[in-house]
Amino acid sequence: MATKHDLADWVHDALKDSGGSARLVDVAKKIWNNHEIELKASGDLFFTWQYDMRWAANLLRRSGIMKASEDSPNGVWELKK
């Protein structure tokens, strides 16, 4: 069963697969396309995963893996190079 902590890896993977940056909606689509079965089997996470995806992005920013939101175009998430 997936947890919200798995979302940090999934966000990171989605951004890597997108060349290092993507719109939030495209990250969500990649996560859904790659992890739909796990999300559906994850109890309450199924209903909160898009919120938790944003939490995971903030975790990646604080860890220095993603750029700060003010350093990226509006609505775009980016990995640091």
Image (cartoon, helix red, strand yellow):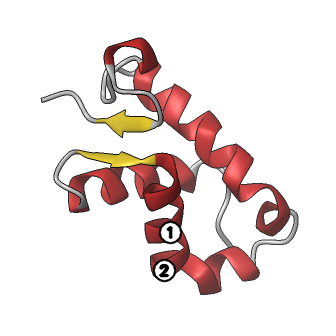
Q: Position of residue 79 (x, y in %)?
A: 26, 35
Residue 72 located left or right of residue 47: left
In the foreground, 69 or 34: 69
Q: Position of residue 13 (x, y in %)?
A: 32, 57
Q: Position of residue 16 (x, y in %)?
A: 23, 53
Please state which amino acid type lies under the numbered disc 2.
Asn
Kindly identify the residue that appears in the image at 71 percent across and 57 percent down.
49
Q: Which mark is residue 33?
A: 2
Q: Secondary structure at mark 1?
A: helix
- Residue designated by label 1: 29
Q: Position of residue 4 (x, y in %)?
A: 66, 51
Q: CA distance from mark 2 to mark 1?
A: 6 Å
Please rate how many residues cluster around mark 1, counting C-alpha atoms within 10 Å: few if below 14, some from 14 to 19, many from 20: some
Please state which amino acid type lies under the numbered disc 1.
Lys
Q: Is label 2 in contact with label 1 (beta carbons under 8 Å)? A: yes
Rendered view: 59 above or below 3:
above
Residue 19 located left or right of residue 69: left
Kindly identify the residue that appears in the image at 50 percent across and 35 percent down.
57
Kindly identify the residue that appears in the image at 62 percent across and 79 percent down.
38
